[in-house]
Image: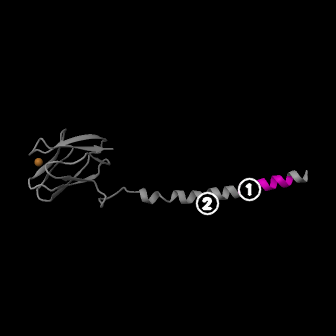
């Protein structure tokens, strides 16, 4: 009988030790949180469309309502004009001109073009 009681005590201590280890490992796992918190104001990581050689570049994915910056490296002026409705429409002067617009709040794919050069086409993805 005594031997069984002793064994039970050892088991109990082992469980308590494991429990301590578990919670100890849990707190470091929670720390990566601040690194992924990239919500908020315009910052160096803000979405950017760079127009160059009459092209908008690859489709850009942004969060709903994000502030999107546009830089125009061409000498000619361009616009970023949504195909449908008035989702967004900005005029960007040439030779390094910049503009910003607010991305739509509804998730989806928003094709856009340049009103001066309708063959210029790009896509903004909101999700
Ligand atoms: Cu253009």
In the displayed structure, 11 sits above or below 109; it is below
In the displayed structure, 97 sits above or below 85; it is below
Judging by the rendered image, the residue that carries numbered circle 2 is 24
Relative horizontal placement of residue 20, taking residue 37 as reference (left or right): right
Image: magenta residue range: 5-16
Is the CB atom of the residue marked by disc 2 within 8 angstroms of ligand 1's nearest atom?
Answer: no
Residue with the most extreme front position:
53
Residue 12, image x and y in percent?
A: 76, 54
Nearest the eye: 97 or 84: 97
Judging by the rendered image, the residue that carries numbered circle 1 is 14
- Magenta residues, dominant SS class: helix
Nearest the eye: 61 or 84: 61
Q: Is residue 15 magenta?
A: yes
Dot 2, crowdedness within 10 Å: few (<14), some or many (≥20)?
A: few
Disc 2, SS: helix
Residue 61, image x and y in percent?
A: 30, 47
Residue 110, image x and y in percent?
A: 24, 41
Residue located 83% across and 53% down the image: 7
- Quadrant of residue 36 within the rendered picture: bottom left
Picture quarter with the C terminus: top left
Residue located 59% across and 58% down the image: 25
């Amino acid at each position: 009988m005594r031997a069984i009681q002793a064994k039970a005590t050892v088991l109990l201590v082992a469980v308590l030790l494991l429990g301590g280890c578990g919670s100890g490992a849990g707190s470091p796992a929670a720390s990566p949180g601040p690194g992924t918190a990239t919500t908020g104001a315009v910052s160096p990581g803000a979405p950017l469309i760079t127009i160059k050689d009459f092209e908008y570049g690859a489709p850009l994915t942004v969060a709903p309502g994000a502030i999107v910056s546009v830089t125009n490296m061409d000498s000619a002026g361009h616009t970023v004009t949504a195909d449908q409705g008035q989702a967004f429409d900005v005029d960007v002067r040439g030779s390094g001109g910049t503009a910003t617009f607010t991305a739509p709040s509804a998730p989806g794919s928003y094709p856009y073009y340049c009103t001066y050069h309708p063959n210029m086409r790009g896509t903004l993805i909101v999700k």
